Image (cartoon, rainbow, N blue to C red):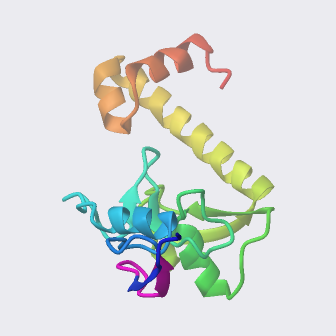
């Protein structure tokens, strides 16, 4: 003799289903696991799908974006620029933060460049910074003071010095 099936409503998706167990609460294992996930407490540090990564870039939750990562996040400055130009970036385009602050994603601080243009910008910037570092070192050779002034490690300054100016 076979068990009679009972008509039930899934606690997760509200779909109707038949089950041989009258105590069933879910139409599938998928709905069961989804219901468990929905009950997980949101951490107090949750910022609504926005966080700053270790490189200093702000990432926002946008899983529908074609270039979002596997967790559904994308760098905020990319989205800001794409909205401004009305299209997705192509593979040869990079966004440069004019003031060097990776978390300042105001459109006036962003510059759309090619990869080669971006390398040139940073090459010129690095050369300029190294020149300024050597100018400061020529004043008093206080490496700790200069490292704090430029917000770089003392090891970076030692590396510049060891390259004997051929930076």
Asked whether 163 or 139 is in front, the reply is: 163
Residue 30 percent location from the top left of the image? 50, 66
* Along the line of sight, the residue nearer the viewer: 47 or 162: 47
Considering every residue shown, the one lying at the far front of the view is: 1
Measuring 62% from the left and 20% from the top, which residue is drawn there?
Answer: 165
Name the residue rendered at 71%, 77% in the picture.
Answer: 88
Q: Quadrant of residue 65?
A: bottom right
One can see residue 104 in this view: no
Q: In the image, is residue 17 part of the stretch drawn in magenta?
A: yes
Q: Can residue 82 be seen in this view?
A: yes
Residue furthest top as drawn: 162
Q: How many marks?
A: 0
Does residue 1 belong to the magenta stretch? no
Q: Against 20, is 151 above or below?
A: above
Drawn side of residue 150 relative to residue 124, left or right: left
Residue 22 lies left or right of residue 20; in this view the side is: left
Q: Residue at image x 65%, y 26%?
A: 167
Q: Where is residue 20 in the image (x, y as percent from the top left)?
A: 46, 72
Find residue 118 and report its image quarter.
bottom right
Task: Identify which residue is drawn at 57% across, 75% down.
Answer: 79
Residues shaded magenta: 10-19
Place residue 101 in its image quadrant.
bottom left
Q: Main secondary structure of the magenta part?
A: loop
Eyeballing the image, is 13 above or below 101? below
């Amino acid at each position: 003799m076979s068990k009679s099936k009972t008509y039930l409503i899934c606690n997760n998706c509200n779909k109707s289903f038949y089950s041989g167990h009258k105590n069933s609460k879910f139409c599938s294992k998928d709905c069961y696991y989804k219901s468990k996930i929905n009950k997980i407490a949101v951490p107090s540090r949750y910022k609504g799908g926005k966080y700053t990564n270790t490189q200093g870039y702000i990432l926002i939750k946008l899983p529908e974006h074609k270039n979002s990562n596997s967790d559904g996040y994308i760098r905020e400055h990319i989205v800001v620029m794409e909205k401004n130009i009305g299209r997705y970036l192509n593979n040869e385009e990079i966004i440069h933060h004019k003031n060097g602050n990776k978390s300042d994603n105001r459109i006036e601080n962003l510059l759309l460049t090619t990869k080669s243009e971006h390398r040139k910008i940073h090459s010129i910037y690095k050369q300029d910074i190294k020149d300024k570092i050597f100018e400061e070192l020529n004043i008093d050779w206080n490496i700790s003071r200069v490292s704090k002034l430029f917000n770089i490690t003392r090891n970076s300054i030692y590396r510049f010095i060891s390259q004997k100016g051929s930076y």
